[in-house]
Image (tube, rainbow, N blue to C red):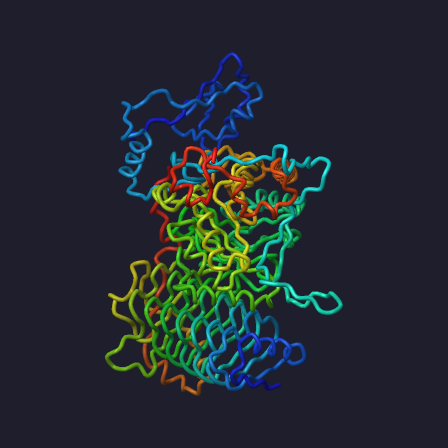
Amino acid sequence: MNFLNPEFQIIRDKDRCIKCGACVRQCSYEVHVSDKDTGELYTNDINCVACHRCTSICPTRTLTVKKNESVYRESANWTSDYINQIFRQAETGGVLLSGMSNPQPYPIYWDKILLNASQVTNPSIDPLREPMETRTYIGAKPDKIEFDSNGKLKTKMPPQVKLEMPIMFSAMSFGSISLNAQKSLAAAAQQCGTLFNTGEGGLHEELMPYKDCAIVQVASGRFGVSKEYLDMGRIIEIKIGQGAKPGIGGHLPGEKINEDVSKTRMIPIGTDAISPAPHHDIYSIEDLRQLVYSLKEATNYQKPVSVKIAAVHNSAAIASGIARAGADIIVLDGFRGGTGAAPVRIRDNVGIPIELALAAVDERLRSESLRSKVSLIAAGSFRNSADVVKGIALGADAVYIASAALIAMGCHMCRQCHTGKCNWGIATQRSDLVKRLNPEIMSQRAANLLTAWNHEIKEMLGGMGINSIDSLRGNRLMLRGIGLSQKELDILGIKHAGE
Amino acid sequence: MIISANSKHYQNLNEDLRKAYAKHKKVTIKDVNGQRYIGCGLKGDYNLDIFGTPGNDLAAYMDGPVVRVSGNVQDAAGNTMGSGEITVCGSAGDAPGYAMRGGTMYIKSNVGYRCGIHMKEYKNSRPAIVIGGCAGSFLGEYMAGGIIIILGLDKPRDAEIAGYRFATGMHGGVIYLRGGIPKARISNEVMALACDEDDKKIISQYIDGYCSRFNYDRKDILNEEFVKIIPRSKRPYANMYAYV
């Protein structure tokens, strides 16, 4: 007996069920069981994680997943989550581990920010008829540009990367997600003229055709990092932190290190892949500068170098240091960002919202005349195109999305990525599950999402009377807060609605 | 080809070095005085002879070349190196061989903290670091593969061969210690064993390499027993978590 109550209940409509057994075959959590003798189907509700694979695959729509109606005595303080977590820890003595993003009801500032639109004066623009620019160049910009007498550019430009839209796919390593999932993202990025990010897991040989739209990541464990790997990426990203687990490193358990993952990470099969939070050669901004420049030297100053940090209390000061350390790009990852695995207490309690961190960092870099020296990428839960527009108006050059892209590919946000049993073939290395994800179909779905968002961004821009994303960047006059305190408005640098 | 480093900025020096390698296989740099990133990202069948003290990240991400330093090196020499060889006729600073994945480093004297941190091996690529003197704390931290041999030559009588928190988080590879080390300095994740015949063969091979580079006599090194340190598990944190 483990004291745990099932979180979910499976309701099977016996009139509709044709006992085909698809649910039994499809569920990696072994929720559905078929009786060997009678062929009757039963459910182990306790194993259900609400991933909805069975309800989607069932040909007769027999199944419904419901929240378990059997409840503990209600308490606002001792919620069923906290009670169940104590049961789990009492049973195992383990650190609670979960996947995906912070589910706690903290304020979501995107939902408290409203966009402007033009009326009469400075008329709105119709993106269906008029050119509307969402192309974005990422990389450090020179303070001024000089030309010679023939009108040729004299200034040596730092390396720039062109994005057809200000949205990229955030880092998800091969290991944390499947090769088919990574392939889908890479192909979608290529189709849409944007980039995907390898995460700290190396670049699988089957992804080499997509190297021109790859951001290659370097983190403390240096998994998969070699001279070729650095040469292949369009951008090299140093990972210092992740929004879902600030101050915590990565740890891919040995059971996910199969032959293919081992080859890409260049480590033996079955060994834990440990990437601790601190880079043990970085204890200061000066040390960070050393790593930034070692990567620039190794690639002959041909690629922008990015530094990714989690959004934390002192992000603004840290970002100022990163800009001074010679990074071309700063990535800020908010505390609602996703993860393949994070300790629950860290995921749910550490870090700050991306909205506040982004506004604070942009403001700080401007006040120190550093803003043009770096591109600013925001990450950590952009759920739709309006979030993207608000993020750019708060100061981002572009945004990273990951959870949204996975949802486009079938993720149902069941937060079980850490178990490696993903029924949708995304966060798993089990070959029977991985093959459920068809990269051709899923890349098109991810590309569709980007195309749709890009179009929506153009419509919102047009509504504001703006025809280029550059005119939106840091343009906080286009934003108004709703139901926010003066302090929150001050940090966001926006006025209240009606002002 | 000989390059004089003088007081050149590292960017200029490395630019000169890249140009030199476009035409020559062997390059010597003289009067090096703390310039960083020398040979960083260098790939191919090259030779590099350095006189003076190269700065941090010497031969980082290097793949193939043979580097010899007549002098000491600063921090993170051989950082994430893929293959090749670095010989240091002196001491190395902190974190030499960080995440080294292949190739060999011979260091005549001592190394600082965190030597061989995150060293890894994969299939035939098995990196090795041979340290003639003593090591600072955290030797072989998070080590996931490869070989570290530490000889403790010229060790002061009251000193230990390596500092504290020896092999913390180690989950792969092997460390050979000449003489041994007090138990209190060794992390819980590893165990000390006697060397078997296979170990002796490996040690002998690298001792030969060390002796030929620094003019030592084998007998003076093999006069003490070696102790082998290996991890208890390749999954040190396997039972740490409860899934929710």
Left/right placement of residue A135 relative to residue B10 reads right
Left/right placement of residue B180 relative to residue A38 reads left
Q: Quadrant of residue A150?
A: bottom right
Left/right placement of residue A246 relative to residue A79 reads right
| Residue name at image x 23 percent, y 79 percent | B158
Question: Which one is nearer the viewer's eye here, B26 or B54?
Answer: B54
Residue A236 visible to an observer of this rendering:
yes
| Residue name at image x 53 percent, y 50 percent | A377
Question: Which one is nearer the viewer's eye here, A479 or B73?
Answer: A479
Q: State the image coordinates of residue A469 (x, y, percent, origin top left).
A: 61, 45
Q: Residue furthest top?
A: A15
In this rendering, the count of numbered labels is: 0
| Residue name at image x 57 percent, y 36 percent | A409
Q: Residue furthest right?
A: A150
Q: State the image coordinates of residue A144 (x, y, percent, origin top left).
A: 61, 63
Q: Determine whether A246 is above or below B229 in the image.
A: above
Q: Quadrant of residue A335?
A: top left
What quarter of the picture does the N terminus of chain A occupy? top left
Residue A254 visible to an observer of this rendering:
no
Q: State the image coordinates of residue B167 (x, y, percent, origin top left).
A: 34, 64
Q: Residue furthest front?
A: A121
Q: Determine whether B11 is above or below A432 in the image.
A: below
Question: Which one is nearer the viewer's eye here, B207 or A353?
Answer: A353
Question: Which one is nearer the viewer's eye here, B1 or A61?
Answer: B1
Q: State the image coordinates of residue A448 (x, y, percent, origin top left).
A: 64, 36
